[in-house]
Amino acid sequence: MSPALSFAIAGALLVLVVAVVLLRPLLRESPKVVIGIAVCFSLAAVALYRVVGTPAALEVQANAAMPQTLDDAIKQLQAELAKNPDQPEGWRLLGQALGNSQRFAESRDAYAHAAKLTPKEPDVLVEAAQARALAAPERRFDAQAVTMLQQALEVQPQHQRARWFLGIAQRQAGDDAEAVRTWEPLLAMVDGATANSLRGQINDARKAAGMAPLAAPVQPATPTASAATATANALHVRVQLDPDLAARARLRGDATVFVIARAAGGPPMPVAVERHALSDLPLDVTLDDGDSPMPTAKLSALKDVEVLARISASGDAIPQAGDLESAPARVTLPATTPVDLTIGSMRQ
């Protein structure tokens, strides 16, 4: 067997093992799906070899041990990239694996390498910006992350995730009018249910900027093709205020209650959110795809979510110190029983 073919096969096997480790939680429930994805990853590795050739610095030794765990795969990938760092897809895969392991600072650095090698790839720039936010205190987008998002939009103005994250960064910085200008083009890019939810986020920003709200959304005439899946993954949530906290805290009558679902162990941005008045407590609500503020993230697409409720005196959806929160509840979808949340602690 030629060294070139040996490298291709070894690379495919490495990617196969990494894919299986990453997808291990699905193995029992959907083994065919896992195997299919893993094989596709392996074929992609062979295709990548055919494009870039056989880097001598990544020569695989015949007796090299295959990784058995995600940590082993990460270490092996780090070692290979140390020998040959000019591999953007390798850095991107490393960033994803480190992020899945909650090693956000290292994930940020790996994605930064990938972005440096591919400065014109909008997906990589957005992933690098998101990784910086996940690694930062309070999950905030810093100036460098904002620059990456702007660069992504220069290359691809209709990149939905870049627009969404840039709008969040602008709101975090108090640039509400800029956030409005960033988000409003998304309304023409997304489906009706997502647009209705996004409109609420835009109107929050317009209010903060002293601007008039948008016109009322037009209700869709017919349900979408994914309505059955969205309904199956709808989440019934009951929210109440801790009686002791209610007796001690001085709550403003115009305070806002947010009921939020987000990806478990993932980004802090919600995949479903509803806004209610404090006077509505206790609440009994249903979260579904129609409550998604993110054009590229749907509640029905997730298996595990975290659900929480927060009282905001400012009425702002962005978390702030002094907000009152419930403990997050982890839920596997579809959920057959209601999620009970009690708001009883102050956000630090």
Image (tube, grey):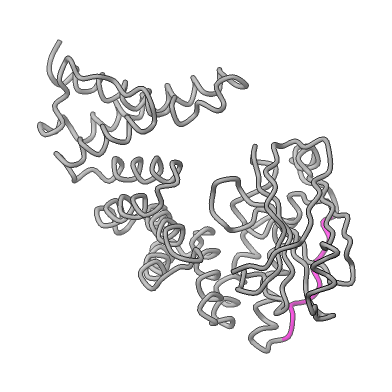
Q: Which residues are magenta?
A: 212-220
Whether 337 is drawn above or below 294: the answer is above
Q: In the picture provided, is 56 more to the left or to the right than 93? A: left
**Residue farthest to the bottom?**
210
Q: Residue at x 54, y 70 (%)?
A: 167
Give the quarter of the image for residue 260. bottom right
Name the one closer to the observer, 249 or 71. 249
Q: In the picture provided, is 251 more to the left or to the right than 184? A: right
Is 338 magenta? The answer is no
**Residue farthest to the left?**
56
Which corner quadrant holds the N terminus?
top left
What is the total number of numbered labels drawn onto the structure image?
0
Whether 107 is drawn above or below 201: the answer is above
Name the one closer to the observer, 310 or 145. 310
Q: Position of residue 52 (x, y in %)?
A: 20, 36
Q: Position of residue 182 (x, y in %)?
A: 55, 73
Q: Position of residue 278 (x, y in %)?
A: 84, 71
Whether 301 is drawn above or below 295: the answer is above
Q: Residue at x 81, y 49 (%)?
A: 340
Q: In the picture provided, is 135 more to the left or to the right than 7? A: right
Name the one closer to the observer, 144 or 278. 278
Q: Residue at x 55, y 28 (%)?
A: 25
